Image: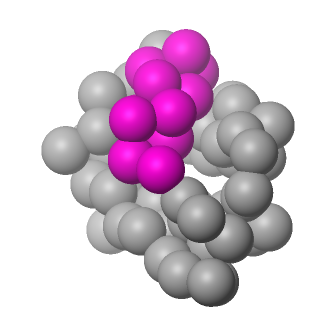
Amino acid sequence: MTGTIQYAVPGMHCGHCERAVKEELAAVAGVSAVDVDLETKLVTVSGDALDDRPLRAAIEAAGYDAA
């Protein structure tokens, strides 16, 4: 079942931030797409059987907090 989960990641502010978050999230099982909007500080993750815990851990591994 494909779905999406959205996170507010207020610490992101530049292209490096965007790349770091995208790379960590893309490595999580089931993730098919990651969209980062630096203006709104929102990250949208799409994929199959998404699990909140590893997604939040990936954002934290990139150095950011997910709200």
**Going by the image, does 59 lie left or right of 30?**
left
Q: Does the magenta run of residues contain 54?
A: yes
Total marks placed: 0
Q: Measured from the top left, where is residue 28 in percent x and y?
A: 71, 40
In this picture, residue 30 sits left or right of residue 8: right
Residue 63 visible somewhere in the drawing: yes
Residue pictured at 80% horizontal, 37% vertical: 27
Residue placed at 50% from the left, 41% from the top? Answer: 55
**Residue at screen point 47% across, 50% down:** 51
- Residue numbers of the magenta segment: 51-62
Above or below, 56 against 67 in this view is above
| Quadrant where the image shows the N terminus | bottom right
* Quarter occupied by residue 18: top right
Query: Which residue sits at x=28%, y=54%?
Result: 8
Q: Which quadrant would the C terminus be assigned to in this image? A: top left
| Image quadrant assignment for residue 19 | top right
